[in-house]
Image (cartoon, helix red, strand yellow):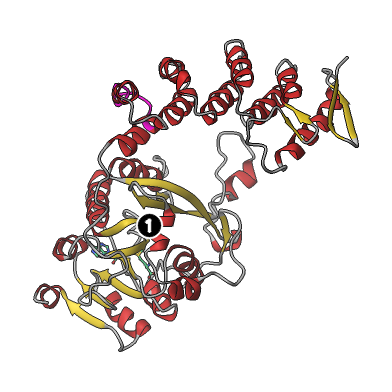
Amino acid sequence: MSQLKLFDDLELDIGSNIGNTKELLKSLKKVGKIENLNNSESVIGNITYSIFIELLSHKITAVRLEAVKHLGKFNNEEVGKSILNHYSKEQDSLVRRECISSLGRQRNSQRIPFFIKELGDRDPKIVLQSIRSLLIFKDRPEVMNALKEMTNHPNEMIKEVLEIELSPRLKRTKINHIQVNEKLKNTVVNGDVLKVLPIIEEESFHLTFTSPPYYNARDYSSYSSYKEYLDFLREVFKETHRLTKYGRFLIVNTSPIIIPRVSRKHSSRRYPIPFDIHHFLMQDGWDFIDDIIWQKPEFSVKNRVGGFMQHRKPLGYKPNCTTEYIMVYRKKCKDLIDWNIKQYDPEIIEASKVTEDFETTNVWNIDPTFDKTHSAIFPESLCKKVIQYYSYKRDLVFDPFGGSGTFAKVAKEMERNFFLIELNPTYFERIIEKVGPKANYQTLNQFRQL
Ligand SMILES: C[S@@+](CC[C@H](N)C(=O)[O-])C[C@H]1O[C@@H](n2cnc3c(N)ncnc32)[C@H](O)[C@@H]1O
């Protein structure tokens, strides 16, 4: 039986003994921490690549995976050939991908035909990794032609990578990313969102956080059908997309709602609002980022479980609904979040850092809040979290369905500028009361004339 000598103090049998495998994997991960493995030497310290070549035939997939990863750090022909040879036999898709990655790291132009061939693999992970390896040789016509032929690939991630890599660098935006339009600063408009939004210049908002009307479940809204309601929201979010700055966030708070039954002969109806909204946002230029759950205490929600509590009969189960969704989307763009952050002055970045405790999971426990005028308002702590995590100081944050103005109140306290729209005059008055005199309150006509 061969011996694996990774460190002076550690010698392991390279057997298929599962008990040993844990130790073996631990040692293999330890090797990963050694720096400067990336050279063409066959021996580094007391580690030789032949150990890893031997481990390619190990029974346990995780071991083979680690072995291939390490082999990628040795840049020589024998290693390359061993990986290629192993690749042709390997069944596990992650190890196969790692083989392509390790071969790619060798930057050997003789492998170009191999990578081009692998563009035809069924597994998108292999194709993506082969594309990555080929991009190093992007200036060669045969590589460019092969990549161009892939632009109609059915896989969405492959398409996106090629679009970013092959299209001429698009101008991101002509608009200064941190600039805030003076006309919109700390303004609340009393009007219909679909009449106000078209008047506003593109790329005005850094963040949108909103809780749209809950179809016909509340006193303040009535739509003739669920379709009309969804079409309305789709229009609002399409406009919001136009008005959102490059790569910035839209955060939507909704939950499924119940419209009560007409009589005992009929059933009540549940509408899956977050899922229907999600569906069209994905088509309208937003990337899905996160689903955060707003968890409320059970005593604060309507009791639905009472019937089942009595009869205990399967099929008649109806849980108490204690959650709402906080769905996080980002305006589709070609840059990583780092680009957005880099647009800010270092002082703003420093001043905006989240220094206090923050939510570490996507379940946020927050008690609901009640208002004397409005029946469905944001808790201030929810607004605070969203503003802290998704905007910088002096940004312009937006709520198209302002309600009682909670978002504006918190935005102001957190040194952000706000822009709100609210249709209902009674709620508009409540906003004035809540946010105070240091804001611009306008009718639709006044806003039009600005
Ligand atoms: C769920 S509430 C928002 C409550 C708000 N988040 C708060 O903290 O007070 C939705 C609001 O959208 C408003 N609304 C409904 N249709 C509208 C429209 N077409 N234009 C502007 N506001 C509208 C309603 O009047 C309601 O106040």
Residue 355 locus on image (x, y percent): 58, 72
Q: In this view, does 308 lie above or below 251?
A: above
Residue under the point 56% across and 51% down: 320
Asked whether 229 or 125 is in front, the reply is 125
- Magenta stretch, main secondary structure class: loop
Q: Is residue 372 shown to the viewer in this render?
A: no
Secondary structure type for disc 1: strand
Asked whether 74 or 165 is in front, the reply is 74
The amino acid at mark 1 is: Phe
Residue under the point 41% across and 62% down: 342
Ligand 1 position by quadrant? bottom left
Residue 299 locus on image (x, y percent): 60, 62
Residue 243 locus on image (x, y percent): 24, 59
Number of callouts in the render? 1
Q: Is residue 199 above or below residue 442?
A: above
The residue identified by callout 1 is: 249
